Image (spheres, coloured by chain):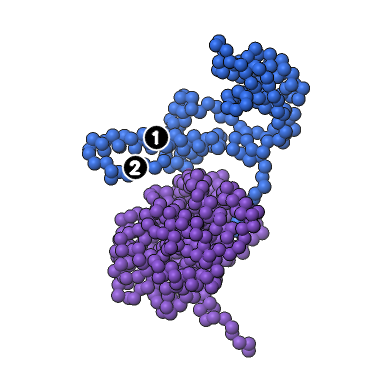
Chain colours: A blue, B purple
């Protein structure tokens, strides 16, 4: 974030409010910097974050605590390649079209779907259908029955299309494959 | 006895001091190298994609000697960012800054002309100036590695032809703010010489915005700006850079370039154009990562060394003289006992003795491990 150069500020009064503006901008920057680091590596220590941002460990602790309390940080998760441990899990992406009524809007229907533990993600999307629902199950049959029994039967659901997930190439901004290596020479002037 | 075919000046050139370390590392895979002066990021994908697409369409010809017009226009526009108002007519696309340095020197140097080089310095200026026929005068800048008005003014009336400036600096990471540049410019005008301003790390300035010395009053007609895409846009191996220079000097550089290089590779030129059009976001991402690494690494090394927080580039240049070891002894022992490679400071000039250069263009995880090993090493001495 770029801060407007100081020289445009002329009156003292303005300078005062500008200073507090700078302080809040710096604070916001620190929050964003911390979030960026945690988003990429949630297991990094507060000490390391402090060193990377050139601030005190206390400030990092306080900021993270604040962000957790405010619900900015919702949860710390781990991105796992379950296939590598041979886990037999099946994911499917379900396109769900719904009919809205006076009594039931998107939020009501979405909440109803989201509460099933089998449901991994629920998103309202634009386009040919309304909700994109990711369902996790043990087998294709498992998921098919879940969709037939629990989602299609919701009165507002008009129809569904199920896409079984075959392979993931990128997840949460992380490539799930490695085809590049460091080819630099060991010493370069 | 067979005839000696070698050019006298070439024969006198010393091989790069870095070479020996390179040989020591070969074949060892446990080494964490902080000796690599290039980004650890590959070329951003959208730039690579654009180059691949151009190859698919068969865009593989020579370009104008100057480079693609669209790229030259984009470069002229881009340099407003660093304070310089220019047009494509003063832009020459080169095969990296390395070629640019050679062209600049050969275009202006007559045999015996004097060239000032502040030290510590990037390794190629002195040899290239020497081969071009110049008499090289080095200016030591220890302890804070900053060139000042006073240092330069000592050379008044000594017929100095050029000063080579490199900021943010390899190997020290030092850069200059406007006021400091104005002082240097004042001295340069008094010496009535040219500045060859290597601004390849301009995008990697962390404490303040990079400003080109060419933007200062009276400098426009005596500055050769050299810059490129290797560091900021992580395009090292593509060898693509540019020069911005006054009309007569650019004409001179073009003459040498058209006969020796013809033009920069077209694929790399297309990648460079994409970098300027759409590379800003990737650049910012890499920049913020370098800042985090710099802060982290400086903090760690301050446990054992006196380290100044560098303004830019991706190097730190700590003073190791308190260990009682010379730069080379330090680097060699560190490599052999802890498998961490750094470059001895004297590779960058005599006044770099007592220092080492550590490049932080490696991941935080590696920096953590490397700093632990360096600290262990220093404490064991």
Q: Residue A164 at x, y = what percent?
A: 72, 29
Q: Residues within 10 Å of mark 2 (few under 14, many from 20)?
A: few
Q: Residue furthest bottom?
A: B1
User: Visible in this render: residue B217?
Assistant: yes
Q: Residue at x 52, y 75 (%)?
A: B13
The residue located at (44%, 31%) in the rendering is A63
The circle on residue A4 is 2
Image point 42% across, 73% down: which residue? B108
Q: Which residue is mark 1?
A: A27
Residue B197 sits in quarter: bottom left
Along the viewing direction, whichever of B217 and B365 lies nearer the viewer: B217
State which mark lies toward you, 1 or 2.
Answer: 2
The chain holding disc 2 is: A
Q: Nearer the viewer, residue B281 or B204?
A: B281
Q: Chain of mark 1?
A: A
Labels 1 and 2 touching (C-beta < 8 A): no
Residue lying at 41% horizontally and 65% vertically, measured from the top left: B245
Q: Which structural element holds mark 1?
A: helix
Using the rendered image of the protein, determine whether residue B293 is visible from the camera's viewpoint: no
Residue B23 located left or right of residue B104? right
Instruction: Indicate which disc, 1 or 2, sits on the residue closer to the N terminus.
Output: 2
In this rendering, would B116 be left or right of A103?
left
Q: Residue B241's spot in the image, x, y percent?
A: 50, 60
């Amino acid at each position: 974030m770029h801060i407007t150069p100081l020289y445009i500020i002329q009156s003292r009064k303005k300078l005062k409010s500008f200073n507090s503006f700078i302080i809040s901008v710096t604070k916001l920057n620190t929050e964003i910097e911390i979030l960026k680091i945690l988003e990429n590596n949630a297991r990094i220590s507060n000490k390391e974050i402090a060193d990377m941002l050139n601030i005190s460990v206390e400030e990092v602790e306080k900021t993270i605590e604040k962000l957790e309390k405010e619900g900015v940080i919702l949860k710390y998760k781990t991105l796992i390649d379950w296939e590598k441990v041979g886990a037999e899990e099946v994911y499917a992406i379900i396109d769900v079209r719904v009919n809205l009524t006076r009594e039931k809007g998107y939020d009501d229907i979405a909440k109803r779907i989201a509460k099933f533990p089998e449901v991994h993600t629920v998103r309202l999307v634009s386009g040919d259908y309304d909700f994109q629902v990711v369902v996790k199950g043990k087998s294709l049959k498992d998921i098919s029955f879940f969709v037939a029994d629990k989602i299609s039967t919701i009165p507002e659901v008009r129809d569904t299309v199920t896409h079984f997930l075959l392979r993931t190439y990128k997840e949460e901004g992380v490539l799930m494959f490695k085809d590049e290596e460091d080819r630099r020479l060991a010493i370069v002037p | 006895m067979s005839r000696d075919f070698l050019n006298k000046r070439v024969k006198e050139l010393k091989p790069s001091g870095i070479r020996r370390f390179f040989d020591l590392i070969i074949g060892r895979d446990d080494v964490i190298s902080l000796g690599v002066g290039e980004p650890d990021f590959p070329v951003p994908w959208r730039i690579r994609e654009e180059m691949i697409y151009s190859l698919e369409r068969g865009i593989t010809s020579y370009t104008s000697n100057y480079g693609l017009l669209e790229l030259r226009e984009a470069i002229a526009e881009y340099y407003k960012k660093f304070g310089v108002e220019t047009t494509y007519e003063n832009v020459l696309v080169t095969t990296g800054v390395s070629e640019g340095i050679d062209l600049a020197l050969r275009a202006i140097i007559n045999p015996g002309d004097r060239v000032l080089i502040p030290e510590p310095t990037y390794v190629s200026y002195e040899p290239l100036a020497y081969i071009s026929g110049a008499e090289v005068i080095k200016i030591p800048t220890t302890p804070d590695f900053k060139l000042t008005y006073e240092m330069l003014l000592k050379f008044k009336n000594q017929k100095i032809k050029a000063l080579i400036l490199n900021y943010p600096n390899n190997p020290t990471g030092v850069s200059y703010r406007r006021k400091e540049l104005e002082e240097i410019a004042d001295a340069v005008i008094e010496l009535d010489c040219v500045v060859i301003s290597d601004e390849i790390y301009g995008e990697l300035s962390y404490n303040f915005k990079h400003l080109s010395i060419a933007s200062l009053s009276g400098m426009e007609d005596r500055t050769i700006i050299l810059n490129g895409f290797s560091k900021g846009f992580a395009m090292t191996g593509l060898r693509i850079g540019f020069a911005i220079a006054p009309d007569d000097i650019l004409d001179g550089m073009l003459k040498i370039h058209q006969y020796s290089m013809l033009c920069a590779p077209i694929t790399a030129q297309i990648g460079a154009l994409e970098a300027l059009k759409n590379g800003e976001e990737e650049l910012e991402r890499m920049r913020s990562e370098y800042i985090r690494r710099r802060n982290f690494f400086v903090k760690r090394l301050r446990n054992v060394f006196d380290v100044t927080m560098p303004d830019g580039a991706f190097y730190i240049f700590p003073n190791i003289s308190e260990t009682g070891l010379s730069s080379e002894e330090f680097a060699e022992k560190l490599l052999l006992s802890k498998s961490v490679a750094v470059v001895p400071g004297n590779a960058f000039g005599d006044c770099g003795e007592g220092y080492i250069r550590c490049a932080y263009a490696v991941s935080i995880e590696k920096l953590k491990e490397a700093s632990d090993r360096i600290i262990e090493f220093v404490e064991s001495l």
